Image (cartoon, rainbow, N blue to C red):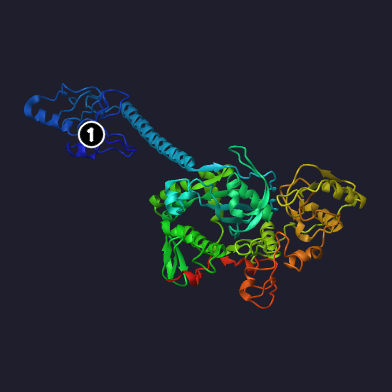
Amino acid sequence: MRHNSVRGPRARKSVPGAREKDGTGAPADGAEPSEETGRQEGTGSAGKSTPAGKGAQAGKDAQAGKGGKPEPSKKPGRSDKPEPSEKPGKGGKPGKDGSGAEPPRSRRARAARIARWAALCLAVLVLGTSAAGWFYYQHLNGNLKKDALNLGDKRLDRSAANAAGQRPLNILLLGSDSRNSPENVALGGAREDADRKPLADVQMLVHVSADRSNMSVISVPRDTRVTIPKCTDPEDGKVYKETNRQIINTSLMNGGPGCTVAAWEELTGIPVDHFMMIDFSGVVSMADAVGGVPVCVDNNVYDKLSGLRLEKGTHNVKGEQALQWLRTRHGFEDGSDIGRTHAQHMYMNAMVRQLKSGTKLSDPDKLTDLAEAATKALTVDKDLGSVKKLYDLADDIKRVPSDRITMATMPWVSDPWDPDAHVIPKPGDAEKLFSLVRSDTALDGKDPKKDDKGPAPSGPASPKGSIAVTVFNGTGTATQPVVTGRGAEVAAALVKQGFTKATSDSTPRAQADTTLSYAKTSQRADAEALAKALGLPERAVRMSTAVDGLTLVIGGDWRTGTTYPKAGDAAADDKGAKPGKAGKPGQGETSGQAEKSGKPGDDDKAQGDDKPKKEADNKAPESSDPLNGNDTSACMKVNSLNRF
């Protein structure tokens, strides 16, 4: 860094005949050295800069007959330029040759001092900038609110790594209706609810594939009646008993977002890695920070309960209007919570497209505003509780192309316990949707056929007696209690078949689907031989870096017997409601989608269709209303009762 002093260009111009610095930055011959070795020129003992032109004034004094002597008031450390009228040898401290030129050693010393000062200035700037950045980073970290990930007694194992060592990511996004602040009360209304525990009115599971090639988002309507497992509040130790009589948005009241995570694992069998929760004021600040989000309505809409009022067409909603859009349900479709999930998908798709385009992030001020808004608005699990981890997560997600993002709503049927108010998962279709996510299969049906088993075996399987496999009991999932002794039972059955090195391990595991994993390509043939002996489907066999050897985990889908149940054994569950099942909890004959066709119980028919449709096994069922991330033509259908 150049240090400005009286020896700068302005000073040189005021002294006729002064020489320019040479290419090294050191003064050229004839320049006078500093009077106090080790101090930077141009500074006095108090560190103040000498006024420019001091040397020029000395020159004028000499011409006026005051001689060429140094100025008597000069203090040590101040710079003194040679007078233009001086004769050689009279400009101050003469050199050995009497010419007044600076000796080479003095020039080198001065150059070294300048270099040291420049380095010091640079270090101060770097450290100062780093310190400011560190303090701001700590400030953003301090904005984040953190909570426990899972408050249930049981937690599913993480998704297994694939052959490349990659794992999928499952993040639960929650929108809280908390009114715990004046801002939230003003935005959410219902002042009488200010002291009520918040509800999770928005719930979306974001699944990012292991290879980061695609992303699936599943919404569960807030009015879905589910089993909410036993949860313990980490703050006061209060225990909330398991119940199957509440809707999923009430799970947030049972100790916090960790209980909603437990309810999702119970419902879907999908292990949740992280959660993020935002409240009313957070939605407003985030919407403002990104500059608004484009949404569309096919007619004029006015929902007096949420306050949303829009004319037909596309609008850029932000601030409070964005919150109104996300909260509106009476204004869209049939006025139920289903329409609200579709509106939320449209909003989220549009926001993702904008953020991925980078248009909102090119301005540093807007980027800072976004960072402030995001960190202040979010409550996250403790493992995600830093800006760096959030950044790494965002960096993972942004790699997914927009056209490989699919939004879907859990297929549903009316709840037989309260058909006018609540829904339950649609038998068959809902499980298919959850299963696709568990197996890391894209909902858009565009995934190439996966071979999680790695390269084909180069030779035949080893003799049965030499194939070692460890069997774990993973039946104790969030959905179902553990079946005691399953690992030992299956291991004993393998020994009887000749796999004498089969052993069981009592270490607790928990996963919805049975899997047989192996670590090396050379073990594939042995794994396939084991799968054949047990009747395991091809999809259950996979190569994974998460295991050391052949590892069989008996999942919640195989609770009895020593041969894996065939697909036909569960066919009854895939057919939807059957006569005689209508009165059972969790079953229903009336589909919310089928009601529109006037044929209750016709769960196998697509919405508004008279004939069953055969759907691909590798994509989301049509009853989940899938929406592609690049679909800019989507427009919300306005409820006829809420038009103006």
Locate residue 118: give its quadrant: top left
What residue do we see at 67% from left, 55% from top? 267
The extreme bottom residue here reads 610
Q: Nearer the viewer, residue 377 or 82?
A: 377
Q: Nearer the viewer, residue 550 or 455?
A: 550
Q: Is residue 164 visible?
A: no
Above or below, 29 against 314 in this view is above
Provide residue 430's location: percent of width, then percent of height.
67, 62
Identify the residue position indicated by label 1 in the image. 6
Provide residue 128's location: percent of width, then percent of height.
40, 36
Locate residue 12: give its quadrant: top left
Q: Report the quarter where the N terminus lies.
A: top left
Label 1 secondary element? loop
> Left of 16 or right of it: where is 537?
right
Above or below, 364 against 127 in this view is below
Q: Nearer the viewer, residue 94 or 477?
A: 477
Q: Is residue 434 visible?
A: yes
Q: Report the quarter where the C terminus lies.
A: bottom left
